[in-house]
Amino acid sequence: MSLLERLERVKQQELSEHKGAVVALEKKVEPVAKTDPYTKLKSKIHKKVIEEIGQQVEGEGNETLQVRIEKLVSVAIDAEVSFIPKGDKQRIISEIVDEAVGFGPIHPLLNDESITEVMVNGPNQVYVERRGKLEITDVVFRDDAHVLHIIEKIVAPIGRRIDESSPMVDARLPDGSRVNAVIPPISLVGPSITIRKFSKVPFTIDDLLSFDTLNLEMAAFLESAVKARLNVIVSGGTGSGKTSTLNVLSSFIPDDERIVTIEDAAELQLSQDHVVSLETRPVNIEGKGSISIRDLVRNSLRMRPERIIVGEVRSGEALDMLQAMNTGHDGSLTTGHANAPRDMLSRLETMVLMAGMELPVRAIREQISSAIDIIVQQSRLRDGSRKITHITEIQGMEGDIIVLQDLFVYEQTGLDENGNCLGTYRSTGIRPKTIHQLEAAGINLPAAMFASARF
């Protein structure tokens, strides 16, 4: 490279750094809060609507109530102002309806099927996730009190509370979407809400195939594993799609079996008729009355379950879950946080110790190896896509080590020009040790399914 070429490269680099500094400076500028000229009008009309409707909403469907409110708001606007543009009037009506029967400014985001997550970072900043990517929106709240009002509207119907003495809460929306809320003094940016949306229509295995979360051979094996009553744990990181996959796996359970589901906040959407859903309960205002997942797992054993589905194991309930799997409750399903199948085993060991039982490590590993048959590892890749990267079988113990064998894997090969991950699913060529359990259940999988070839 000549000196002139080197000089030109240095100049280009300096120009790039200058532009970067300008962009960084622009980002540091505090955003100007958006002002709505109709704020006082909306507040006044909202109070009128509440006074007029009062307690008459009991037993009235949301659609009927929405129509009534729209008419009331339209009449109130005409009485308050002599002229208002049609577009502004419709916007005011929509916002007041959302405030009265929905969840305020974020209600349209919750109805948008393309959005999978809504994140409220204080009153002036709302992000959403679309196709695995974060986007900022132009949605704002009036103030901190407005955000807090929406949080209370979410948590109150399910018997949860949030205040200074209990500034964090897990909850759910009526459609099962997962909600976490944090308020000051824990949150320094004001009341914050994170909503993991669930599809209004539960995902099916066909949906996961269309999303390329797995391939047909993997789907057929997982269906067979659930029907043959193998114990399965879905492992993965936060936001990797574990609960959605668990929901799909549970759809393979026959309709004539009694299912007990146990969750922190009820999210699973099972299609079977015979389902008993249990949900944990936090402490009351006196600091008493807490019901943990571990309490529910122990109680479920007295409920004659044929399948136990735990939304997620994260502490001492892992021991009770393993014991249930080892004492006749085959075909149980659960999820756990881990980055790889081997990591999931380490996490399970740690969680069992959290139960307060001083068990030898070998005894814990023997419990794990005899209880769990299949680990389904799910990951969220850098392009936002969710993939089942491993279907791994636990084959028993060799000495003090649990033996794992990958049956199917996803191998990433690179990125395309749009930054999307490229890869392929393949069988490792290993025939599963549990094949005899599948055959005993009348399921005969073709040998070609486990041939070592790329699909």
Image: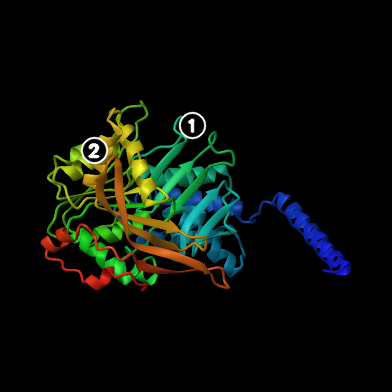
**Mark 2: few, some, or many residues within 10 Å (few <14, many ≥20)?**
some
Task: Check the picture and name the quadrant holding the C terminus.
Answer: bottom left
At which x and y percent is residue 214?
36, 66
Give the left or right position of residue 214, taking residue 330 as reference. right
At 52% from the left and 58% from the top, the residue drawn is 128
Q: Which mark is residue 320?
A: 2
Mark 2 or mark 1, which is nearer the start of the sequence?
1
For the residues carrying marks 1 and 2, which lies nearer the camera in this image? 2
**Mark 1: few, some, or many residues within 10 Å (few <14, many ≥20)?**
few
Relative to 243, say whether 180 is above or below.
Answer: above
Residue placed most toward the observer, 398 or 257: 398
How has the structure been colored for display? rainbow
At 21% from the left and 59% from the top, the residue drawn is 226
Looking at the image, can residue 119 be seen?
yes
At which x and y percent is residue 263?
30, 45
Looking at the image, can residue 72 be seen?
no
Q: Which residue is mark 1?
A: 164
At 25% from the left and 68% from the top, the residue drawn is 220
At 47% from the left and 35% from the top, the residue drawn is 167
At which x and y percent is residue 49?
46, 52
